[in-house]
Each structure stands twice: as C-alpha cells, then as structure tokens.
Amino acid sequence: MKTRRITTAQALVAFLEKQYVERDGIEQQFFAGVWGIFGHGIIAGVGQALHQHPDLRYYLCRNEQAMVHTATAFAKMNNRLRAFACTSSIGPGATNMITGAATATINRLPVLLLPGDIFARRNVAPVLQQLESERSQDVSVNDCFKPVSRYWDRINRPDQLPFSLMEAMRVLTSPAQTGAVTLALPQDVQAEAWDFPEELFEKRVWHVARQPAERAMLKRAARMILSAKKPMIIAGGGVIYSEAADALARFASQTGIPVGETQAGKGSLSFDHPQNLEAIGVTGTPGANIIAREADLVIAIGTRLSDFTTASKTAFQNPDVRFINININELDAHKHAGLPLVADARTAIEELIAALTGHRVDNDYSSRIAALKQQWETEVERLFNLHHGPPISQGEVIGVVNNFSRPEDVVVCAAGSLPGDLHKLWRTRNPKGYHLEYGYSCMGYEIAGGLGVKMADPSREVYVMVGDGSYLMMSQEVVTSIAEGVKLTIVIHDNHGFSSIGGLSQSVGSAGFGTDYKYRQADTGRLDGEYLPVDFAANVASLGAHTIRATTREELQSALEEARRQDRTTAIVIEVDKEARVPGYESWWDVPIAEVSEVEAVKQARAEYEKRVKDERHFLKG
C-alpha cells in the first residue's frame, strides 16, 4: 500500500480538497474553501497546511461566529450540495463558533468545524486557554460542541483521522442527518506526521440519493388525499433543498390544493401561483391560517412543523384533521402521528402527481382559495402604500425594496420584527429569492449570511435587511465583504431598539420594558431616558461601505438605484417607526404569561392567555 508521510493537518487539508458530491448526474466540489482566524493552537498546524496547499482557498473572517453563519448561508443557497470548513484557535476562538454550530444544526445545513484543542499528550498541561477539570483529563471547551453537532470527534492520534473524515463526510452529505460536524484537533496532533494511505487523497464522489417513498405508504397517502374535502399543503425548506419547486407547482395546479409556506419554504411557489396562500403560522397570512384551521388533511412537505413557523399546536382545529408528512428525516416524518412518507420531496411529489391523475378539489373550495388570495393581495398593497411618517413604516420599506428588486435577487434576514413582516409581505418570485434563517433566528446572522449567499451565486443582487439590534451585534463582516470584493446591499432599519421583543413585551403586559436604546435616568435608575444618538451611517461607513441615508419612500428608491450602480458593499440607513407594525393574522403563539402580577396589563394578558392556550392540541389520530 502506498503511503504519504505528512502531518495530520496536511492530510486533513489534502483530503478536503478532493471531496465531491453528485446528485442527478451533476458533480461538483463539496468544499469551497476554509474560513478562519489563525491563533494559538491552529496556526502551526492547519494554518501551515493551508499555507502550503493554496488549492483549498483560505478566507479570513472578522468573527468566528460570523464565519460559521457565512458557511451556513452558503450551504443553504447551494441546497446543501456545497459547504465550507471553519477553523479556529483553541479557547475563545473555538467557543465563538458554538452559536454558529447550533444555527447550522438546527437548520440542518452542513458545515465542518475544525477547532484547535488542548495537547493530546498532556505533559505540558495546562496550556494557554485550557479548561481544567477535576473529573477528567480528556475534557476541553470543545466538548461544548457535542449537543449542537450532528457528529463530533476528537483526533487524539494521526491514525484516527481517516476513519473520522469518512464519518464526517457521511453526515455532511446526508440529506437526513446533516448539520454541523466538529472535529476537535489537538495542537500537537495537528503537527505530528504519519504514513497516511495514498487512497485517502484520491478524488472521492459522494452520491446524494433521491429516496423514493415506500409503495404501500404512497398508496395510503393517495387514498387520504382522494377522500379529503379540505386538504392543504405546508411547504417547508425540504421542498427547496430537494429542488422540488417545479414539481410542487404542478401538483398544486393539478389538484387545486392550497399551499402555505414556512419561513424556510417561502419561495417554494411563486407568490402569484393561484394555489399559493403564502406564509403560514404566527407570521402567516389570514388565508393560509384560516384554511389551516379548517383543513381535514395537512400534507406537510419538508417541514419539521415547529411551533412558531407553523403554529402547529394551535393552527389545525378541525377535529378530524390528519397529516401526511413527506420528509427525508424520519423524526419529522412521524410528527403529529402523521402518515410518514420518508422520501426525497421531489420524488414523492412526482409520485403523487402520477397517483392522483384527474383528481381536483371541488369548485367551492377552489373559489374560497381564490377569494382569500385576492383579499391578501389587497392587504399587501395597503401595507406597501401607507405613506406613514416619517419615520416610514417597516412594511413600506419592505414594499419599496421588494418592488425594486428583480426576481432573481435575494433578500436575507434572520431575527427581530423583520422576519415576520418579510414572511407575510415579501413577494417571492424565485425559489432562492428569500433567505431567512429562522430555525434559530440568530441575531447577527444577517450580514455574514448575506456574504455566504452572494459567494454562492455572485450573479444575484443580495439585499440584507437588518434591524439596528442585529446590526450592533455583528456588523464586522462588512469588512470581509469589502476585502473579498463581495458586494452586498444592506438596508439598516433604525428603530431605536428591539422592535420584535418590544412588541411582544407590550402584548404580555410588560410595556416594552428593557427593549429600547435609551439613556438611564439618574433620578429613577430606569433605562427610559432619551434615545441614544447612534449614527449607523457613520459606523458602517467606517467599515468601508458606501453609505446612503434615506428618510422617505422617494429617498429609499433613489438610494436603491444608487446602490445598484456601486461595485462594493453599500449600506442604506433608514429610520422606521417601530410602532407602525404589520398586524398578525388568524394565529396565536404560546408565550406563558405571569400567573400572578400586580400589573393590571399583565392580569389582562394572563386572562386572554388562559383562553387561547385551550386551543393547543395533541395530534394522536393516525
């Protein structure tokens, strides 16, 4: 057997560069490069290997959490068929990546994490940044990655690397099991040489299969659909990852079954498709939520039926409602005691199209769907044209950007009040036109995520919509976008605080306590003085972005035109009125209210809560 005597880190880098994936006969390199910030515990190992192996491109980020967000967005935009690796120093560099790991795993998106670690040989312990434990010598801060990784390993000897790499790739390329994969790399082992088998460095192609539905289950699903009077489809992220948008459009058109989209699934149908009632759940449209409440059959495709994005414990109130769950992940396929079709979304939809030839919902149901859809289009136009302020309403800002953008352009967001408003209002015309990280709703994802989206497809204009709260948490990847020549258009909504949680605080009787960016009052000790004078335009300009201030609709339109002409990242800063909110429609979210309180508003909120919580259901009917 031929061998190559190289270090563990050199072997790792050489392996990553030779990994490919293939689906539907299309082959592509899996790893687009490695992100990192070199520091203690990584620079002499993985850093040295990357330096002498330039074919695997190295990208310098400004924050370790942000680089994982960039990698996650890149994988999402590539339908999980491409990925980045992210490396860091031991200690704080590593633990900075934990939030990013959780974001990737919860959203089921592949990213490879390579944190430096303590010495495997232990004789020099404790080293700089080492966590000591009275219980074990085999504990480091990298153990914190275990619950947020789909696969975790520590490479304590060079000869362990080949086996761990194969397992890592198995998980990363699995549609059902993917997420963050963490390989902790003790710093001495990185630099240690071993005779690695030459076969490890040969080109390897990982086939991503399209699993068909089990035949008996498919027949049962068809019978359930044929007998349903008020069926509906919930389209989740799995529709987009499996490239099933065209199949879903044909299925919905053929059967007339209406579709509601989750945050991850928005874009599964063009907004103007006749069967698309658009957003569902707490941030949903009235039509989708009314139909969900009455549905006797819910066909959940590629969604995990999470509480917020589908209101899944309260949305479905028909006493006879049943579920068909099409999902590549067995855990999700069995939720709500549904009929589990463990299958690739596109394959399963195409099989159902064939099985349901000639079937269509009745005319009364079709007419109701059309009426609800038209009512929503009227409401969107109203919200887009309020002519509120200044400050302008957030809904109007979304409308101006949406109308200005082209079908192939992408909006990126993650946290605050913007995701709910975007879910309802953004008119998506392309399966990749709407990029929301809402599995974890991680503040700070937006700019880093926009960077990953643009790197995945440079031909698209990317509009990062970010509130002032998320911007202040993580804005430094503006610098990275400038360094890499990756142009973003960042629309910063200045609403002087945390708009989303402020509104929630008001709804639970707490009057927005602790959610505004204000001075502390010397006489009362409370944070309810004047607003802080944060100059977001000056701040983002200092990071290298071309910056424009806007106040009105007309100024925003002009700013967008100027931004399109720029060849570098451009930020538009606009003040919005956080009290001019887009309403909620026909849905409710369980946020427990204090059972006893001296505050009258809390008492009233609790009384309403006790009424609404009775709508929560257990779905046990198979």
Image (cartoon, grey):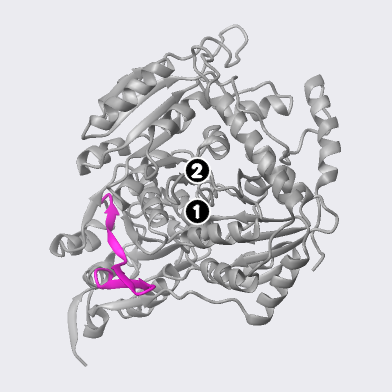
Residue under label 1, please give it. Answer: 102
Pick whichever, 363 or 33, lies toward us: 363
Q: Quadrant of residue 488?
A: top left
Point out the image quarter for the N terminus.
bottom left
Is label 2 in a helix, a strand or a loop? loop
Q: Are marks 1 and 2 in contact (CB under 8 Å)?
A: yes
Q: Is residue 496 magenta?
A: no
Rendered location of residue 138, percent (x, y): 45, 67
Query: Of residues 248 and 536, which is closer to you in this image?
Result: 248
In-front residue for pair 434/498: 434
Image check: 540 left or right of 102? left
Is 148 left, or right, of 588 in this rendering? left
Residue located farthest toward the bottom when viewing the structure as drawn: 1
At 60% from the left edge and 6% from the top edge, which residue is drawn?
523
Query: Which of pointers 1 and 2 lies earlier in the amino acid sequence?
Result: 1
Task: Judge by depth and name the residue closer to the eye, 612 or 372.
Answer: 372
Say what amino acid the circle numbered 2 marks: Cys
Left/right of residue 42 with respect to residue 371 in the rendered view: left
Residue 186: quadrant of the picture: bottom left
- Identify the main secondary structure in magenta: strand
Type of amino acid under label 1: Ala
> On the image, numbered disc 2 is attached to which residue?
442
Q: Is residue 148 visible?
A: no
Residue 22 lies in magenta, yes or no? Answer: yes
**Secondary structure at numbered mark 1:** helix
Query: Residue 19 location in percent, x, y?
Result: 29, 72
Q: Which span of residues is magenta-colored?
A: 15-38
Q: Residue 617 appears at what percent x and percent y?
A: 81, 52
Q: Is residue 119 above or below residue 431?
A: below
